[in-house]
Amino acid sequence: MAEDIRRGLTSTPKDLSPWPKYLYDGEGSRLFEEITRLPEYYQTRTETSILRRRAEEIAARTGCEELVELGSGAAGEKTRLLLDALAARNGGRVRYAPLDVSGSALRKSGERLLREYPGLSIRGFVGDFEGPLGGLLVDDPGTPPRLVAFLGGTIGNFTPRRRLRFLRGLAAGLRPGDALLVGVDLVKDVETLEAAYNDRAGVTARFNRNLLRVINARLGGRFDPRLFEHRAPYVAGKSRVEMWLVSRAAQRVPVESLGISVSFAPGEGMRTEISTKFTPVSARRMLEEAGLRAAGFYTDEDRLFGLLLATPP
């Protein structure tokens, strides 16, 4: 983290967006769960609605017996819809391999799921999905076909280079019979996109400023979140929303663990997250560039969000 934050704070412009994982400490994760329930934030409820209609079809099409979920979080309704669909095809038996940065979240969700699904077996992994996935995607002939799910539109948080590297790593870990399900947020009108990241209740602004508190707590920063304004414009040329923290005044902020002081001019911004939006064509191209074969595309009636199904070549 120290190296990532140092690089981001000393770049021009200041840019922490390549490392969105630092937004999700305990408070950040709580705030994000609150964001998913906001009226402006369509992504979660739309993706869930697609899975309600299509999970059984996806299970039938793939024939998988294990769900591998990257960034599983609290293992909510989307996870259960996929588990239900897989279990129904396999006589109630299903395997689940969640990966999340929070060990406590994995244990809590695992205990709940085991009570709900008598035929479920779980092997959980604490870690970052940008790290090595060898233990998660073990190449064991005894392992049944796996459906690897990367939901929530999180793929849009990667820069293009990191996205390609991540997907190529996944492709290398998939075996014949495995499948990959990726959630992608779709290009749409600017008003809808910007409202999702600039909610009237200000929850996303608190989520964004919480990153400064994370830096303060973990790296000895002296950021005052009140001195930064949240902004999240849609950048049409790059098909993405960019979250920024913009300094309200001239200030110099020490970060003790890094041994640096960071200067901000009035109105100077620091990018904290990107969220790329896709068309069906650009989403399929993304998979093909990573060496995957697009096998299906599922969306809602309003074409707000999509689920891409892919298989090894």
Image: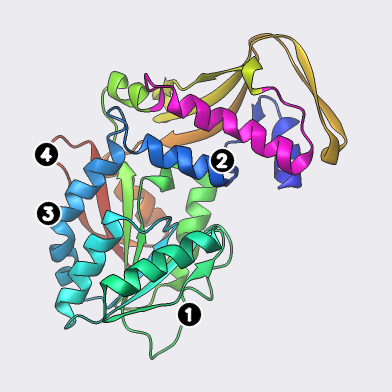
Residue at mark 4 to residue at mark 3: CA–CA distance: 11 Å
Q: Which of 116 and 73 is in front in this view?
A: 116
Q: Where is residue 65 in the image (x, y as percent from the top left)?
A: 27, 78
Q: Which of 99 and 275 is in front in this view?
A: 99
State how the image is colored.
rainbow
> Disc 3 marks which residue?
53
Mark before the other along the chain sequence, 4 or 3:
3
Q: Is mark 2 on a helix, strand or loop?
A: helix
Mark before the other along the chain sequence, 2 or 1:
2
Label 2 close to label 1 by CB (< 8 Å): no
Residue at mark 4 to residue at mark 2: CA–CA distance: 32 Å
Mark before the other along the chain sequence, 2 or 3:
2
Residue 223 is one of the magenta-drawn residues: yes
Is disc 3 surrounded by few (<14), some (14 to 19) or many (20+) residues within 10 Å?
Answer: some
> Disc 1 marks which residue?
138
> Disc 2 marks which residue?
23
Give amino acid for label 3.
Arg
